[in-house]
Image: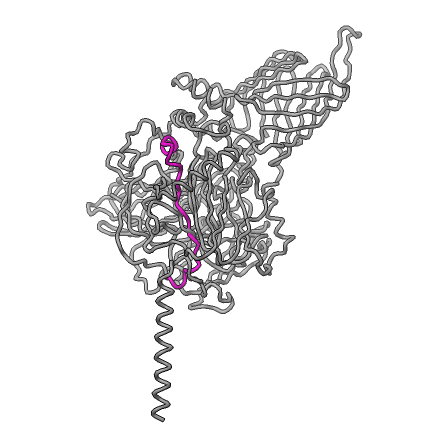
Amino acid sequence: MKKSFFILSFITASINVLAQHEHQMQNMEPASQRTNTTLKHSASGHQGKKIVYNLYINDTIVSHVSTKRKALTINSDVPGPTLYFTEGDTAIIHVHNKMKDETSIHWHGILLPNEQDGVPYLTNAPIKAGASHTFIFPLIQSGTYWFHSHTSLQEQAGVYGSIVIYPRGYRKRKERVIMLSDWTNERPGEVLRSLKRANDWYSIRKNSVQSWGEALMKGHLKDRFISEWKRMPAMDVSDVYYDKFLLNGRPKNTDEEIIAGDTVKLRIINGAASSYFWLQYAGGKMKIVAADGLDIEPVLVDKMMIAIAETYDVEVVVPNDGMSYEFRATAQDITGHASLFFGKGMEMTAPDLPKLDYFAMMHMMNKMDMGNEGMNMDGKDMTDNMKMSDRQMKKGNKMKGMNEHNQEGMQMNTKPKNVDSDKMKGMKMESINKPNSTDSNKDKMIMGHDMEKMSMDQQMGKDNGEVTLTYDMLRSLEPTTLSKDKPIRDINLMLTGNMIRYVWSFDNKTLSQSDNILIKKGENVRVKLINSTMMRHPLHLHGHFFRFVNAQGEYSPMKHTFDIPAMGDVTIEFYANEEKDWFFHCHVLYHMMAGMARVFSYDNSPPNKQVTEKDKKKIFHEDRMWSLWGTTKIATDAVFGTINYSNNQNVIGATYRVNYKNKYEFQPDYQRFIDTKQFLSVFAGADIRNTFKIMEGDRFVDRRVGVVGARYLLPLFVLAELRIDHKGEVRFQLTRSDMPITRNLRLSLTANTDWEYNIDFDYFIHKYISVHASYDSDYKYGTGLTFLW
């Protein structure tokens, strides 16, 4: 009996030793490689404590946001409520759609089963009008996250809220959730339509037109000419003019519960549809302690920019002097800000940021090698830049950060508090933003300030003693390198777009034109991205964290969202341990809707139980949507205008003119863009008109012909048209439309080989109305009003 007991004890001890050894070996692996067994548990098999929430989505007036337009609310407010959990809980969230339209909720940054991710027609069925849907998923992480609608443009209208997940054993202290957003009194659909039709009323409102008259007055006439010769639209850092910028739903907030001497943790979320924000605190430096929900080595900064959909945890101290100190979020285009004041007493405000010098931006951009005439780089440019990125990585070169500065951050060797290594095994991570370091002009341009006038010290994060956050300053608390024994899949993506037609894409293909990006479970995925556009883009990969490769090397931070600056490049890496389909897209809402999205698809995955393959095709509908718009000019000489019904590749349009003496002309056609840059299109249509013939009895002679032809956008935005009608007559025409002479005054010119010509002036007094004056070879002088619709 004793012998048996001894043998049993020996076997038990041996098993324990082996188990302990296996656990130690597992902990020696990089956090990004460990298999996330908790995530794989069935969502119906509840883990930990069950936390239940009910979210009611409706549309109503929210007075503290706007009395002019209804908002879409969650539980009757904008933003929606903050959902609080503790790591290990199981979230049970009932979403009730009280609207007349379908909706959805995506849990941004949360690692969860694919069918809980909330992307309609991809991972989930949409929540129909009047219906409810229950999401159930375990919480295997901690940190600051958020949720929002992934249906159409509902996020812009108010369907968003915050999520806080506390780590196990967390001792709560003073903290505040800061949800940043932007608000327009226009319907979001009308905003997108305005962008699609290239209406520059938003630039007029922001004073960012960069007219020829202003260029002449400021000595930048040459820069304006060079930009237009390259077919580069006017410089800008934001597409939309906003009526308000909101912090927790209000432009200004006061928190008197936080008193002098308090240290408060701010959980900051940028839930804006299309606005980056500069963050400042009037009470001193900000200590960044977490990025995208994960703890990092603390970094002290004076100023930082937060990209759309990112989150940061920041600690600030309220000075003990009886004042009230402002935390300010200023829109990147410096058109407004939102604030939160801590404490009681006289208000101490953060410093105002200088207005942007758009002509200085234009001057610096003109010095850059723009590759493909300011619109996109071609395939060769992309390949060359990819090779350069490879060489830089092999040499261990530092990669530039998201801002114009490059200051190393603090490095404190503290243990992560919100990363359970055993449970974050499959977390995908990303490589930090690294614009090419070979062209210093690019780095100067990134933030859109007058970088040429700044000294080198200012560009390196020492702007008058201030320290500005860069991605290179973000350092993980533990190594994030991927295992070298896994196969590597390299993926190259180029960010592309046409600002004139407002089409955004990857590799010159919108979501509806592209195939899924296939990856395999168990491999390491490295994605290299080059931004060939003049806009910055915040990119988000659903269901994964990735390592954002930066100057910190093997301690590069883990993120789920990152900014890529104009003309910059980035590399991200993650271990593929998921299944099914995951959305990857630009988080500028209007860019995503215009086509800048892809789907990462795991090969040989089981079918999704909520959506069929036929359903998944509906996700392509958004960037294929058609818009109707046009102009009507009511003048003393005639009534004339345009009608357009268009989407990303096609235009069904017509021009028309009728005078008060029964003279008319009508030219309908169908046009399709056939090149990747959308400079070249072909068309077929008709030319229907009557012409007064003096030599033929002083009478009108009808002309009805079918026409085919091509249009090409030349330098200086001159549109060349060559057509031939069915009778064999050829016509060549040149048109320059909407040339900005002053902030509000536009000039349009047309001339063709039929000896027809037109000079047209419009002075904008409203988004939809301008005062019109023209001279036409056939209709002579005319004045009146132009109505845009």
Give the residues in magenta: 421-445
In this orientation, which residue lies closer to the viewer: 705 or 678? 678
Q: Examine the rendered structure and indicate whether residue 558 appears above or below residue 686.
A: below
Residue found farthest to the right: 697
190 relative to 91 in the view: left or right: right
Residue drawn at point x = 41 percent, y = 54 percent: 482
Tell me the quadrant of the picture where the C terminus can be found. top right
Q: Nearer the viewer, residue 638 or 386?
A: 386
- At horizontal 51% and vertical 53% (from top left) the residue drawn is 105
Within the magenta stretch, is there residue 695? no
Position of residue 128 measured from the top left corner of the image (x, y, whole percent): 60, 54
Residue 64 is at least partly visible in this image: no
Which quadrant holds residue 219? Answer: top left
Image coordinates of residue 382 in percent, x first then y, are 49, 36
Residue at (57% x, 55% y) in the render: 127
Displayed quadrant of residue 733: top right
Q: Examine the rendered structure and indicate whether residue 95 appears above or below residue 50.
A: above
Q: Is residue 440 magenta?
A: yes
| Whole-percent x, y for residue 486 in the image | 45, 56
In front here: 256 or 351? 351
- Residue most extreme to the left: 321
Residue 690 picture quarter: top right
Q: Quadrant of the N terminus?
A: bottom left
The image position of residue 573, as x and y in percent, is 44, 50
